[in-house]
Amino acid sequence: MRDLNDLPDLKLALVQSDLAWHDRDANLARFALLLEKAQGADLVVLPEMFTTGFSMDSASLAEPEQGPTSAWLKEQAARLDAVITGSLIIQAADGSYRNRLLWARPDGALLHYDKRHLFRMAGEHEHYTAGERQVRLEVKGWRVRPLICYDLRFPVWSRDPENTDLLLYTANWPGARRHHWNRLLPARAIENLCYVAAVNRVGTDGKGYPYTGDSQVLDFQGETLLNAGEGEGVFSLTLSSAELAAYRKRFPAHLDADRFELG
């Protein structure tokens, strides 16, 4: 059985930024500069649709599965010797459009998670195909499950039987529902007995919607370890595996969790 005490601590870097509307080159240039401040991190997290903003123009903005942003992510991961992740618009091999989180490892591997819950109030379900499965990824032995924005509202999708160490949300969560973001994230941490890290954007998108950031990290009791507020930049924090292990030993509520299978 895996012992959390044997794992090294995990260094996170959350990149909270404004996004240039529908301008991949401008966004990649912005993030390349910001990533200079992420040196030393094990895991670097970018916002949802970080190359375009949250857009429904999937047909005109989609990249192929091995497109320019995929190559850029792999280059940055190798340069920083860290995992880099964030979502963008991808046209999958089957022709469908996906809001896809890419997980670029420094060894050149590129894994992904497709957003499961599509935000119908913006018509996302009419322009994208929903993901079919949860994904558990690893960095330095830590079990990480990535989720995207609207997924946060669905606690069953955030649950799993595999003792996730870190739930990771990347988002374009608008300021109009800021208080939902700040209430739901602690709930996910408490009910899953794990750390939660969440990255949102700031600024105003091409449709005039403002975003208020609040990228943050919470511990397994829902306590705030870091909150970026409305600032733009790279926000870093180290997670303790020993503290997570001690809490789960002291309060093993996960042993009484309901068992279920996702259809």
Image (tube, rainbow, N blue to C red):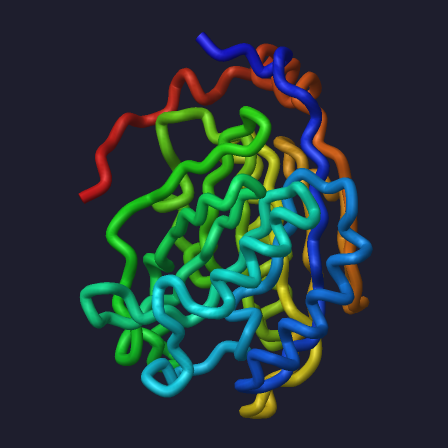
In the rendered image, the quadrant that contains the N terminus is top left
The picture quadrant where one finds residue 42 is top right
The image position of residue 196, as x and y in percent, is 59, 42
Q: Is residue 226 above or below residue 64?
A: above
Q: Is residue 197 above or below residue 170?
A: above
Towards the viewer: 262 or 34 = 34
In the rendered image, the quadrant that contains the C terminus is top left
Instruction: Please report the residue visible at 39 percent of the width from the left and 83 percent of the height from the top.
Output: 56
181 horizontally vs 238: left or right: left
Towards the viewer: 245 or 23 = 23
Q: Is residue 242 above or below residue 261?
A: above
The image position of residue 155, as x and y in percent, is 41, 46
The image position of residue 86, as x and y in percent, is 54, 58
Q: Residue furthest bottom?
A: 207
Report the number of numbered marks.
0
32 horizontally vs 180: left or right: right
The picture quadrant where one finds residue 61 is bottom left
Instruction: Please report the residue visible at 26 percent of the width from the left and 68 percent of the height from the top.
Output: 129
Instruction: Please report the residue visible at 68 percent of the width from the left and 21 percent of the height from the top.
Output: 8
Instruction: Please report the residue visible at 77 percent of the width from the left and 66 percent of the height from the top.
Output: 33
The image position of residue 122, as x and y in percent, is 40, 81
